[in-house]
Image: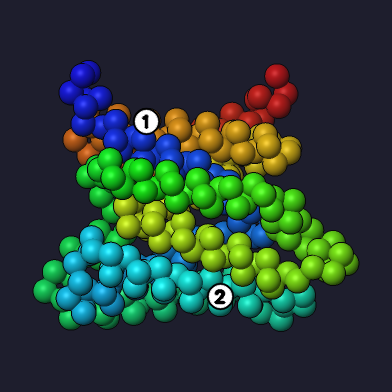
Amino acid sequence: MMEFIQIMYKPLLACLILTGIHAYLGIHVIERQVIFVDLALAQIAALGAAVALIFHFEPESPASYFFSLAAAMVGAVIFSLTRTRKEKIPQEAIIGIVYAVSAALAILVLSRSPEGDEHLRQMLVGNILLVNSSEILKMLFLYGAIGVIHFWFRKIFIEISSHPEETRIQGRSIQFWDMIFYLTFGVVVTSSVKIAGVLLVFSYLIVPAVAGSLYGKTIRSRLVIGWLVGGLGSLLGITLSYFLDLPTGATIVCSFGGILLALALLKPFLIHS
């Protein structure tokens, strides 16, 4: 048990930090009905890292991070500008197109690298098992700062996600606040993908938020449920990956899926009990 704690406590801490910020952002994504926006932004950030690789920057270098961040910022601007009052084309369609094109471009770019297949796998599943103390502190500081921004402007962010028409009536610019939302979202996703990979980041965003929506009626209750599910899924996935010698990221994703399935199946019994 001591060996398990020594090896896995850092990945678990990183997972809990991911849960804290992504469960909250996931509530906004569910409200906006743009489920794949996180996946698209994550893929755009991964594309930026792939371009940095072609310029011979190491994946762990600051230059690679800023390539990813710049790409994610471009994606954030696109998504904030494509949300219109009367949508002839659903924004989810635009998000899907951006994701598909970004994924294809990343494959094309990495095909020029002799280690392209390994880098592509790394972008998808990450390697959270190797997270170090420095990265955990950076995550804590960065996500804490973004959390403060969202807490300070929480009423506006919730309003533009749930009731955008009220924002227009009050004379606020939806595109401006969408820009702020997606820019901060892009910073979170860029940092998360670097550590956890595209699939795990998407799972942290959507699964806890969906679980919260199943059982919670208010934003606060949904957030608390999301945090609990994210923490439980992280602990279960990390424990299974250690004792069964399985890839950590993929095991956490599957644990999330199993927990969500169990919650969905139990809901009718819990409601009528």
Up/down of 29 relative to 117, above or below: above
Which residue sits at x=71%, y=27%? 271
Q: Quadrant of the N terminus?
A: top left
In this picture, residue 147 sits left or right of residue 246:
right
**Which residue lies most toward the right here?**
169
Residue 77, label in figure:
2
Left-right relation of 227 to 236: right
Q: Left or right? Give the position of 188 relative to 245.
A: right
**Label disc, if present, on residue 44 of the rendered structure:** none
Instruction: Name the spot of residue 201 as percent of width and height, x first.
Output: 42, 52
**Residue 162 can be seen in this image:** no
Query: Is 47 drawn above or below residue 61 in the view shown?
Result: below
Q: Is residue 248 above or below residue 64?
A: above
Q: Is residue 53 something one can see in this rendering?
A: yes
What percent of the width, then of the height, locates residue 222?
A: 65, 38
Quadrant where the C terminus sits is top right
Q: What's under tag 2, amino acid-wise?
A: Val
Q: Amino acid at mark 1?
A: Leu
Q: Disc 2 and disc 1: Cα gap in Å?
A: 36 Å
The numbered dot on residue 236 is 1
Where residue 4 appears, as percent x and y from the top left, is 22, 25
